């Protein structure tokens, strides 16, 4: 009998299995987390980062060399980067602390401190659950959702996404902030220390939530600088906190329309207190370069509410004109009506019921009276109240840069 030589079916199956295993190993080696492609990509990225850092280091060296005292001057460094490395750089900006932020055309950003130390700036990641907000196409669908942001100084406060523009996320405290955590608590002026007892005027069982600072811009007390020792918010000084705030031109239109924004009216003092980012800074200590104010402006409230699909539109305060504002603030002919505005459901914009406060302050003046400030009432009205009102709370707002 002749011998038939060839592959058996079993041998063929084993060969195929071995080939599949080898193929899988090859693909993993090529595309896995530590694969050749990933390593090549990381190597390229690291080379780009090193090249960009080298550019900044060269500019730092030259700027210090140009300075007669051998010091690093922010303006000189900015000029050096733009002049000699402009083909690679998108922009250079000087921060308030004289640090620089350098943005390359690749999209990478670096912080440069006054000693010339270079740090790559990573994007800010704000999430709702597992969803990175930077990946959301229609950000308004996330308004009202609780985010992952936490303040180091106020860890018990949850923060909801209130609004977002091209540069920042704006997060609002999900509930009224207790008086003990407000910026004016513990202030010492002329030897007198103001405590939580002085801040509370309500006698309700939840008085700690029910009101704000009793010295909040009242005609008797606020003008002596109670809320900021050494700073007197009157005779025009109140406007400094307003006009220096980066939100003002976009989200506090009245201040740019009003020719009398150095007014000594008490509502100007109140709004200045709320717009004073230095005073509210402890709420913004959870993210680098974030800042906080005492509450949203009426423009931000309307933009936030109107952006959400299905909402009955409230007054559009983004197109303010002299016809609906004057030297004492915004003119609201009548309050926005609850039934046509926020309705009856509990949501981010309104905290339903009065168990803690009747509403919250908006960082916007009112023309009803020189002592009034705008408020968002629990029932859905946009109204105004005396700055000495005893049942209005604060819901601070934190601005967080997207990159």
Image (cartoon, helix red, strand yellow):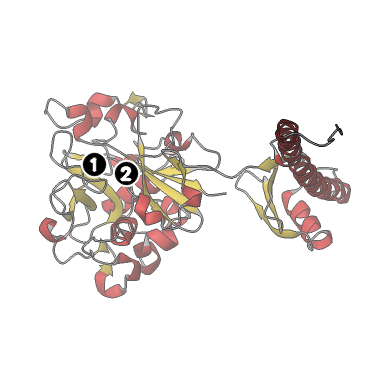
Element class at badge 2? helix
The front one of 161 and 33 is 33
Residue 84: give x, y in percent of width and height: 84, 60
Rate crowding at label 2 as few (under 14), some (14 to 19) or many (20 or more) other CA atoms within 10 Å. many
Q: Nearer the viewer, residue 21 or 101?
A: 21
In front: 306, or 280?
A: 306
Whether residue 236 appears in this view of the structure is no
Q: Quadrant of residue 220?
A: top left
Check disc 1 and report the residue beneath it. Answer: 220
Placement of the N terminus among the 4 image quadrants: top right
Residue 252 at what x, y percent from top left? 37, 59
Q: Residue at x 25, y 31 (%)?
A: 199
Question: Circle 1 sits in a helix, a strand or a loop, which is it?
Answer: loop
- Dots 1, 2 in contact, CB < 8 A: yes
How crowded pointer 1 is (Cα within 10 Å; few <14, some 14-19, many 20+) is rated as few
Residue 301 visible in the snapshot: yes
Residue under label 2, please give it: 223
Q: Residue at x 50, y 43 (%)?
A: 290
Left or right, 381 with respect to 19, comes to left
Q: Is residue 65 above or below residue 28?
A: below
Q: Where residue 174 sits: x, y (%)?
A: 30, 38
Left-right relation of 35 to 150: right
Q: How many marks?
A: 2
């Amino acid at each position: 009998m002749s011998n038939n030589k060839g592959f058996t079916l079993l041998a063929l199956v084993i060969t195929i299995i071995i080939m599949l295993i080898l193929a899988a190993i090859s693909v993993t080696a090529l595309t896995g987390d530590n694969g050749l492609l990933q390593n090549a990509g990381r190597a390229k990225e690291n080379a780009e980062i090193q090249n960009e850092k080298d550019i900044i280091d060269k500019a730092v060296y030259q700027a210090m060399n140009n300075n007669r005292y051998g010091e690093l001057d922010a303006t000189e460094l900015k000029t050096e980067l733009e002049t000699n490395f402009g083909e690679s750089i998108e922009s250079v900006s000087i921060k308030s602390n004289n640090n620089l932020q350098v943005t390359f055309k690749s999209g990478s950003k670096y912080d440069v401190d006054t000693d010339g130390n270079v740090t790559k700036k990573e994007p800010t990641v704000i999430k709702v659950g597992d969803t990175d907000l930077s990946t959301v196409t229609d950000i308004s669908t996330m308004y009202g959702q609780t985010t992952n942001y936490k303040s180091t100084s106020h860890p018990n406060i949850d923060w909801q996404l209130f609004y977002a523009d091209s540069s920042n996320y704006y997060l609002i405290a999900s509930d009224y902030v207790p008086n003990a955590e407000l910026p004016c608590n513990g202030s010492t002026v002329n030897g007198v220390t103001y405590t939580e007892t002085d801040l509370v005027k309500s006698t309700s069982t939840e008085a700690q939530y029910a009101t704000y600072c009793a010295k909040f811009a009242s005609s008797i007390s606020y003008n002596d600088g109670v809320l900021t020792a050494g700073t007197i918010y009157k005779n025009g000084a109140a406007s400094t906190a307003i006009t220096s705030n980066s939100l003002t031109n976009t989200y506090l239109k009245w201040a740019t329309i009003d020719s009398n924004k150095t007014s000594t009216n008490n509502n100007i003092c109140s709004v200045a207190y709320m717009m004073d980012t230095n005073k509210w800074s402890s709420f913004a200590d959870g993210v680098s370069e974030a800042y906080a104010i005492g509450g949203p402006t009426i423009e931000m409230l309307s933009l936030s509410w109107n952006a959400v699909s299905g909402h009955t539109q409230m007054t559009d305060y983004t197109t303010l004109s002299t016809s609906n504002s004057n030297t004492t603030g915004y003119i609201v002919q009548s309050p926005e009506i609850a039934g046509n505005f926020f309705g009856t459901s509990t949501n981010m914009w309104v905290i339903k019921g009065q168990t803690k406060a009747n509403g919250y302050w908006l960082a916007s003046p009112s023309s009803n009276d020189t002592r009034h400030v705008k408020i968002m009432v629990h029932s859905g009205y946009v109204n105004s109240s005396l700055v000495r009102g005893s049942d209005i709370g604060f819901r601070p707002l934190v601005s967080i840069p997207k990159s």
